[in-house]
Amino acid sequence: MIDYTKKRFAIRFSVILVLFTVSILAVIAVYFHQTIMHAVKRHVEEVIQKDFIDQFRRTGIDTSKPAWEEYYFQILNSKGDIVVSSRNSTTFYPVLNRALLGSAFSGAGGFETRGIQEELYLISYFPLNERFAGRIAVPLASAIQYEKDLYRVVFIIFPGILLLSYLVSRYLVRQAMKPVSDAFTYQESFSSSVSHELRSPLASLKGNLEVTLRKERSPEEYRDAIAVGLTEVDRIISLLNDLNLLASSRFKPLDLFREEVDLRVIIAELYESMLPRIQGKKISIRNTVDSGGICVCDKGLMKRVFENIFTNAINYTPEGGKIVIRVFEGMGKLLVNVSNTCTGLDRNELPDLFEPFYRGKSATKGKTQGKGLGLFIARYIVRSHGGRLTAKLTDTGMFSLTVSLPLK
């Protein structure tokens, strides 16, 4: 759908650009034609003044002057009869323009363009004295050829202009449609991921209820079935909460209820709640607080950040591994670093770990449960607080996550 829309917009934009280009070329052609004609007229006016009017006033009619042989020059009386003409114009008789002749005798004169013997001429009528007016004809062949050469160049490069217009239109449409395309892609990915993630707990809940209803059971068995169902419902609710955060992360930061919070207390509470899992995997914990631990933040959301980080650390730490937690201050920031023993993680995967629904290669190969939203949501919450969440692999093979938060 989005590709089809892109193509339609590209074609329409190309047509608009081509029409715009043609219009510009037409304007340029008209302007260039007018400029050439203006230059020719100005040249003719200079020739009339210098070589004919001034000479006529000094010496009268003298057709032997060289300048009179360079142009078709004639002297007319008020009736339009040719009184004198240059030798090269003795057989050159353009149709008389009585309006321009009258204008010349009134002291103004003017120009006209006329075709004579299959050639185009610029003809000027100009005043000489009260008895005579002059007429000069200048061939426009060279000017026309110059103009044709320009048009020929334009027609040669016109296909290139069309191609450039199409390429530019595609680029502009691609840039303009990128946010829309990203939104469509995100929506498709989001819908697909939501469907995939909800299918598993709903299928489990449905299967558990179907099995329970196949025969009469004791109250204890019904109680156990309801407990399993509630666990799946809690799983669905947790997923929906995560998806709600994921959807809002595309548009705005979170609305925060800020208060002074001691992160050491949050970390201790989470440690207590996760202690059975830690002990079950024989993971050793080292918790050090160099300084501080207090910041202004949303307590509930920040607890969720460290819950996601600790859950991630416990899930991916192999049995007998270790987790190191360090709280300290530096450069005006409160820093919490959580490092855990890690196997099978590639450094190239680090940027992808914060993408929604992404799970590392080691996670997909193993039996580790997860939705691939924990680190993404943690980073979104931290960024909403004006902080940063970064990941790296240490030289000792530990996977390290660092939360950086403003102290105030």
Image: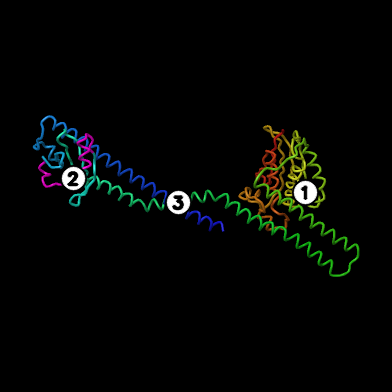
- Among the two numbered marks 1 and 3 on one chain, the one whose residue lies closer to the N terminus: 3
Badge 3 local density, few (<14 within 10 Å), some, or many (20+)? some
Label 1 sits on residue: 283
Q: Which residue is at 86% across, 61% downward?
A: 224
> Whole-percent x and y of residue 128?
16, 34
Tell me whether circle 3 and circle 2 mark residues in contact (CB < 8 Å).
no
Badge 1 local density, few (<14 within 10 Å), some, or many (20+)? many
Q: Would residue 193 be found to the left or right of residue 178 on screen?
A: right
Q: Which numbered tag is attached to residue 16?
A: 3
Q: Mark 1 falls on what kind of element?
A: loop
Q: Which residue is at 68% across, 42% downward?
A: 253
Looking at the picture, tell me which residue is in the foreground, 214 or 165.
Answer: 165
Nearer the observer: mark 1 or 2; the answer is: 2
Residue 58 is a magenta residue: no
Q: Amino acid at mark 2?
A: Leu
Looking at the picture, tell me which residue is in the foreground, 330 or 22.
Answer: 22
